[in-house]
Image (cartoon, rainbow, N blue to C red):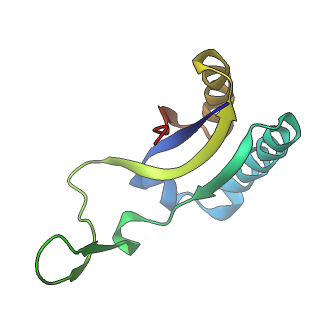
Amino acid sequence: MTQYLLSVVVDASVYDIPLEEAQPQFDATEKFNDELKAEGAWVFAGGLGRPESATTVDGTGTDVTVTDGPFQETKEFLGGFWVVEAPDLDAVLKIAARASKVCEQRIEIRPFDGA
């Protein structure tokens, strides 16, 4: 089985939806997560906070630099993700289609490297 990252591609407006309006989507996502667990495809999932809540650590130079951000220059970013296991691309495409419908967002699929 291969593990895949299913990235939820969002724009900032999703964070402005009132909780009571978003609750049905959260409930549907929880049900979907339970289905993935029952199917044996579930590895891990999570939703992410706004990009401005991020901190970037750069240890590539002599000193370690810690900054707020990244500062978004794009309108779309990673809003959440699933890590799932599937036997092949066809199987994960079906999972991603279900995920997209449940969270009402586009999904990017990437396999993990075998390293």
Q: Is residue 104 above or below residue 75?
A: above
Residue 38, horizontal then vertical, whole percent? 88, 40
Residue 25, horizontal then vertical, whole percent? 70, 47
Query: Considering depth in this image, is 113 or 100 the residue closer to the camera?
Result: 113
- What's the residue at 49%, 37% (across, down)? 114
- What's the residue at 54%, 52% (across, down)? 80
Q: Residue furthest right?
A: 38
Q: Is residue 89 above or below residue 2?
A: above
Q: Quadrant of the N terminus?
A: top right
Residue 35 lies left or right of residue 105; in this view the side is right
Residue 90, horizontal then vertical, whole percent? 62, 15
Residue 51 lies left or right of residue 90; in this view the side is left
Q: Residue furthest top?
A: 90
Residue 111, horizontal then vertical, whole percent? 50, 34
Query: Considering depth in this image, is 26 or 32 the residue closer to the camera?
Result: 32
Q: Residue furthest left?
A: 62
The answer to whether residue 103 is visible is yes
Q: Is residue 48 above or below residue 112?
A: below
- What's the residue at 23%, 79% (across, down)? 67
In which quarter of the view is residue 70 placed? Answer: bottom left
Q: Is residue 15 above or below residue 42?
A: below
Residue 108 lies left or right of residue 54; in this view the side is right
- What's the residue at 51%, 34% (across, down)? 107
Count numbered badges in the picture. Answer: 0
The answer to whether residue 25 is visible is no
